């Protein structure tokens, strides 16, 4: 929103598959129709893809993402190909109308937890660190947490807010 760019959102999880990266089922008039996933829409239209919980995805899904971002190519389950502009130019007359060309404004913002307890996800940085610019975001300090909570708990006494923040700080110390 701050970037004023259109965005698509995908949340990955342990049951994510390579197919779920590229297509979604939708019930229309009592029949299932398949439509492009947020990833494919973002690729095609130059949107920002917000990819959440990337560390939860199985490694084969992470490998496909890495390949797409590093090589600019991917085969979709319906036979279409995703190609970088350079690969599309190299295809020449072999380029098909249904192929998806990666828009030059396409970007990916990925959120992933660190590996290990308590998150129990994969080591996303180890798998994909070469194709992402990583930025570690620490937890906010106690004063910032209280400030963030204030508008959402206007009827909650301040001492309860402080106890909640203290409890989360204590939990963070356990890992």
Image: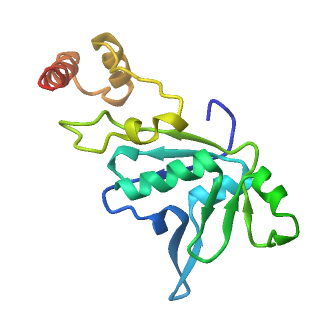
So how many labels did they put on this image? 0
Q: Residue at x 18, y 36 (%)?
A: 117
Q: Residue at x 47, y 24 (%)?
A: 135
Q: Residue at x 31, y 13 (%)?
A: 141
Image quarter where the C terminus lies is top left
Work out whether 3 lies above or below 103. Answer: above
The picture places residue 144, in percent across and down from the top left corner, at 36, 14
* Residue at the farthest front position: 90
Work out whether 165 lies above or below 116. Answer: above
Work out whether 142 lies above or below 48. Answer: above
Image quarter where the N terminus lies is top right
* Residue at the farthest right position: 93
Instruction: Tell me the quarter of the picture where residue 3 sits.
Output: top right
Q: Can residue 38 be seen in this view?
A: yes
Q: How is the image coloured?
A: rainbow
Q: Which of 5 and 84 is in front in this view?
A: 84
Instruction: Tell me the quarter of the picture where residue 36 sits.
Output: bottom right
The picture places residue 5, in percent across and down from the top left corner, at 69, 39
Q: Which of 58 and 44 is in front in this view?
A: 58
């Amino acid at each position: 929103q701050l970037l004023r760019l259109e965005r698509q959102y995908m949340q990955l999880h342990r049951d994510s598959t390579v197919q779920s990266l590229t297509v979604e089922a939708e019930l229309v008039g009592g029949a299932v129709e398949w439509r492009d996933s947020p990833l494919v829409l973002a690729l095609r239209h130059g949107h920002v893809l917000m990819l959440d919980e990337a560390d939860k995805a199985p490694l084969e899904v992470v490998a496909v993402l890495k390949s797409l971002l590093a090589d600019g190519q991917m085969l979709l389950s319906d036979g279409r190909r995703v190609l970088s502009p350079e690969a599309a130019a190299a295809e020449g007359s072999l380029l098909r109308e249904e192929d998806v060309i990666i828009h030059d404004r396409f970007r990916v913002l990925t959120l992933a937890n660190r590996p290990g307890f308590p998150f129990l996800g994969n080591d996303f940085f180890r798998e994909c660190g070469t194709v992402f610019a990583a930025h570690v975001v620490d937890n906010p300090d106690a004063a910032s947490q209280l400030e963030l909570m204030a508008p959402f708990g206007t009827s909650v006494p301040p001492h309860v807010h402080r106890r909640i923040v203290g409890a989360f700080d204590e939990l963070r110390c356990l890992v």
